[in-house]
Amino acid sequence: MIKVVKFGGSSVASAKQFEKIKGIIEADPTRQLIVSSACGKTAKEDHKVTDLLYLTHAHLQYGVPADHIFDQIVAKYERIKTNLGLDLDLTDQFAQIQAQMAAGCTVDYLVSRGEYLTSMLLAEYLGAEFVDAREVIAFDYSGEVNMEKSATQFAARVPKGKRVVIPGFYGALPNGSIRIMTRGGSDVSGAILAALSGADVYENWTDVSGILVTDPRIVDNPKRVDYITYAELRELSYMGANVLHDETILPLADQQIPINIRNTNDPDNPGTMIMKDCSEQDEKNAPDYITGISGKKGFSLITCAKVHMSSEVGAVRKVLTVFERYGVSIELVPAGVDNITVVVETKQIEDHRYEIIAELKEELRLDSIRVMDNVALIAIVGRGMSQKPGISGKFFAEFGAHDINIRIINQSADEVDIIVGVDNTDFEKAISCIYDRFVLRADD
Ligand SMILES: Nc1ncnc2c1ncn2[C@@H]1O[C@H](COP(=O)(O)OP(=O)(O)O)[C@@H](O)[C@H]1O
Ligand SMILES: N[C@@H](CC(=O)OP(=O)(O)O)C(=O)O
C-alpha cells in the first residue's frame, strides 16, 4: 500500500499545524510520499507566503524596495522553526534567495521558494528526506508536464520505502529553470506524484472535512459529500469549488487512483472519497439528488440576433471564429431560433470588446447584438439528478419565489449538471436558495 499525502497551505501555516501533520504521518506507515504547499494564513488578517512572494516580485519589478515584505516571510519561517525546536539553519537559503532577487530572478523562481522552504522545514521535522521538485517534475517549454521524463526522474531521485517530502506547485523546464503551476497547483503536484508512484490512494489534507455540498463561506455548515465521481468533482472545481484544483483529476484518471479529502484539524473524520466510478457505493446507498453546487462571478453574455439564425449553416462557426481570433475561451453557447448567445469570462474580452462586437456584426450581418456583464454562473452537479424528472421546473419556481432572474440555463446531455446564469448580485442568494430547496428539502 502506498499513500501520497498532500498538505495544503492551511495545514502548514504554523508550528501547531506541523505537529498535527506529524501525528497524521506517524499514525500510518504507508503515508510515505509527502507533498507540501507553502505556509498559508494562521488567521484572517495574516497573509499566505505565496501571496507575499508575488508581492515581493511585483515590488522588485517596479524598482520599489521589498525588504519589509521579505522580512515578514523570513520571520514566519524562523518562528515555525523556533517553535518546533529545530536546528536547521535557513540563513544560507534566505541569502541565496535575496541574491537571486538582486540579480532579477523570475517570478516563478521567487514564488516557488514558499513550497521549497516549507518542505525543507517539514522534512527536517518529520525526519524525512527532502527531494526538490525541480529534480522530479519535468515541464516542456509548452508549459505541459512531461509525464515520461518526470517518471524517469522520479525513479532515479525518489528512494523507495523511505519517508520523503517533495514541494508542490513547481517543477523545472528542460533548461533547469523553475516553472510554477497555476494557483492551487500543489493539488496537481500531489496527483502527479500519486500517478508516478502508482499510489493506492491520494490523500489531500486541508482545513475542511471533505468536499462540502457548497462553499462554507456562502452557506453555514453545509453537508459533507461522502462519495463523488471524478466527473462531478471536475465540474464543481472548474466552476469555483476551490477546495481542489480543477486539474487534479487528470493525472489520476488512467490508473483510477481515488482521492481522499481529509481534515488536518479533524484527522479521524473519513472525509470525502473521489472516485472514477461510485456505482458500487450508489447501490448500497442511493446518491443524493444533488452532489454539489459551485459557481463563479464575472461573466458576460453576448447575444447575437438575426432572423432564422439557428437555421443558417455555419453561423455558430462564424461566431466562434471571431472569439478564437482574440484568444477568448468560451464557457457556453446557448441558442434560440433567432439568436446565439456566447458566455465568456468578462476579463477575457475586456481589451477587445469593441473589436469583437464590430466583427460579429459585420461577419454575420446581425440584426442586433447585446452584451450583458456582471453575470454569475452556478453549476448544480449530481449523478443522482438524471433519475429525477422536473428539476429545471423546480429551479424556475424556486428562483421566481425568491425574485432571482435566470439569465441563462444549460443542462449537459448526460444530465450530471445544470448551469444557471444569474446577476452577480444574486449569486450568494441563489446558491443558498438551491441548497435550501434541493439539499435541505430534497424530498419535498
Ligand atoms: N465545496 C467546497 N467544499 C469544501 N471546501 C470548499 C468548497 N468550496 C470552497 N471551499 C473552500 O476551500 C477551502 C480549502 O481549500 P484551500 O484554501 O485551497 O486549502 P489548502 O490551504 O488546504 O490548500 C476551504 O477552507 C473552503 O473554504
Ligand atoms: N501555494 C500555492 C500552491 C497551492 O497549492 O497552495 P494551497 O495548497 O495552499 O492551495 C498557492 O497558494 O497557490
Image: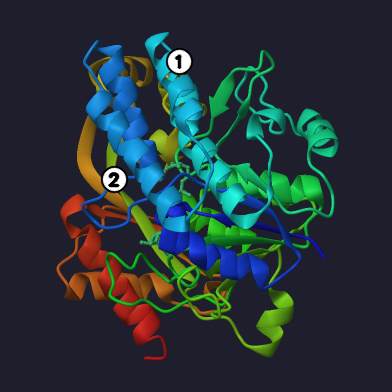
Q: Residues within 10 Å of mark 1 (few under 14, many from 20)?
A: some
Task: Give the residue pinned by disc 2.
Answer: 47
Tell me: residue 440, above or below residue 325. below
| Residue under the image location 39 percent in, 38 percent down | 50
Q: Nearer the viewer, mark 2 or mark 1?
A: 1
Reading the chain from its start, which is encountered first: label 2 or label 1? 2
Residue 278 in sight = yes
Badge 2 amino acid:
His
What's the CA distance linking mark 2 and mark 1?
Answer: 23 Å
Task: Check the image and report above or below for 262 versus 70.
Answer: below
- Answer above or below: position of 18 versus 301: below
Q: Which residue is mark 1?
A: 100
Q: Position of residue 399 (x, y in %)?
A: 24, 70
Q: Find numbered disc 2 in the image and state the secondary structure of the residue it sits on.
A: loop
Q: Residue at x 21, y 66 (%)?
A: 429
**Does the numbered disc 1 mark a residue whose Cβ is under 8 Å from ligand 2?**
no
**Ligand 1 image-quadrant field:** bottom left
Position of residue 199 measured from the top left corner of the image (x, y, whole percent): 78, 57
Residue 202, x across and y down, in percent? 67, 59
Q: Is mark 2 within 8 Å of ligand 2?
A: no
Residue for point 75% across, 67% down: 29
148 or 66, which lies in front? 66
What amino acid is at disc 1? Answer: Gln
Are there few (<14), some (14-19), or many (20+) residues within 10 Å of tag 2? some
Q: Please report contact status of discs 2 and 1: CB closer than 8 Å, yes or no.
A: no
